[in-house]
Amino acid sequence: MKINIINTSGLPLPQYETEHAAGMDIRAFVQEALLLKPLQRALVPTGLQIELPAGYEAQIRPRSGLAYKHGISIVNAPGTIDADYRGEIKVLLVNLSDTDFVVNNGDRIAQMVIAKHETIVWENADSLTETLRGAGGYGHTGK
Ligand SMILES: O=c1ccn([C@H]2C[C@H](O)[C@@H](COP(=O)(O)OP(=O)(O)OP(=O)(O)O)O2)c(=O)[nH]1
Ligand SMILES: [Mg+2]
């Protein structure tokens, strides 16, 4: 499937790093290196604008390597790129470690998964079907 993209970053397009990868790594597009102090967050530009077909979304997810080695995550994970959004995609990084982290131009800071979604219509109801779980949750089945 082809999706229109505008790339003003001069960096490589997001790409699948392996044959069956779900996510394409996306890169930071910054004029100068960005310093993220412990617990600091930043909206990191990518220089990318996309045109998703109706019924699709793009999810912006953390990379596990950055999370494990440097405590770098995404505040709103998974970020949601709506099909009707035409602005620049940005990544809301947060440094959850106790040391500074530097983002350089071109660094692969996150990954994007293109996914289908439903658009639903609510049906007002007076009751819902019964299930074994019922209202149980939050660990009610035990460890
Ligand atoms: O990580 C993200 C999340 C969102 N967006 C863009 C695309 C998305 O379509 C738009 C709105 O995102 P969202 O719905 O999550 O934010 P909101 O706070 O609900 O803003 P809005 O009222 O504009 O929908 O912002 C990004 O670039 N990166
Ligand atoms: Mg919204």
Image: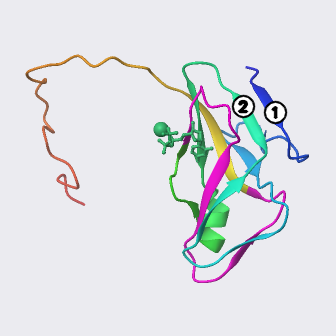
The percent coordinates of residue 120 (x first, y second) are 37, 19
Tag 1 secondary structure: strand
Q: Which residue is mark 1?
A: 6
Q: Residue at x 66, y 49 (%)?
A: 90
- Residue projecting furthest to the right: 10
Q: Residue at x 13, y 23 (%)?
A: 129
Q: What span is in magenta?
A: 80-108
- Three-letter amino acid code of the residue under disc 1: Ile
26 sits to left or right of 58: right
Instruction: In the rendered view, tell whether residue 102 sits above or below residue 98.
Output: above
The percent coordinates of residue 22 (x first, y second) are 65, 38
- Three-letter amino acid code of the residue under disc 2: Ile
Q: CB of mark 2 within 8 Å of CB of mark 1?
A: yes
Q: Residue at x 78, y 30 (%)?
A: 5
Separation (CA) of disc 2 from disc 1: 6 Å
Q: Which residue is mark 2?
A: 50
The earlier-in-sequence mark between 2 and 1 is 1
Tag 2 secondary structure: strand
